[in-house]
Image: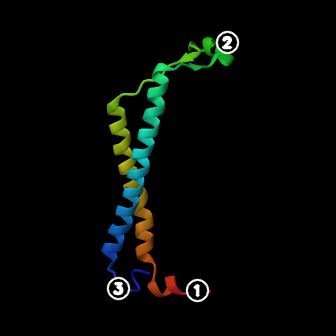
Amino acid sequence: MLLAIGMNRSRIFGMIIIETVLLSLTGGIAGVIFGGLISHYFESHVINMSLWASGLSVMGYDYRIYTSLEPDLLIMVTIMVFFTGIIAAIYPALKALKNDPAEALRTE
């Protein structure tokens, strides 16, 4: 549609990349905050897996689980989400540029 009204291909490509990156960053940051809060809660409250204690002890695990989360890990995950968003946006952006405006607007 944007090609049909005269927008050039490089701007469309940039718009799709920026939109995808902003969506992935928003979701990534929200996920890091939500996951960080849950992890922080379970640092002081035990996850009780006593129902599977015998199987866990055979494998060398304790049935009580305490979580820990380092701030460096949160930053690294956010950066990985950013780059994953960029990589995931490239294919749809290139595919959108290949569409013919007349074909895209035609309805059946």
Indicate the quadrant where residue 11 lies.
bottom left
| Three-letter code, disc 3 | Gly
Q: Can you tell which quarter of the image residue 89 is in?
A: bottom left
Disc 2 versus disc 1: distance between alpha carbons? Answer: 63 Å
* Residue at (47, 88) in percent of width and height: 102
Which circle marks residue 54 in the picture? 2
Which structural element holds mark 2?
Answer: helix
Q: Is residue 83 left or right of residue 27?
A: left
Residue 85 lies, in percent from the top left, at: 40, 54
**Does 103 appear above or below 10?**
below
Q: Earlier in the sequence, mark 3 or mark 2?
A: 3
Q: Which residue is mark 3?
A: 6
Q: Are marks 2 and 1 in contact (CB under 8 Å)?
A: no
- In the picture, the disc for residue 107 is 1
25 is higher (above) or lower (below) than 68: below
Q: Residue at x 45, y 83 (%)?
A: 100
Q: Alpha-carbon distance for marks 3 and 2? A: 68 Å
Residue 99 in the image: above or below residue 41: below
Secondary structure beneath dot 3 equals loop
Q: CA distance from mark 3 to mark 1?
A: 20 Å
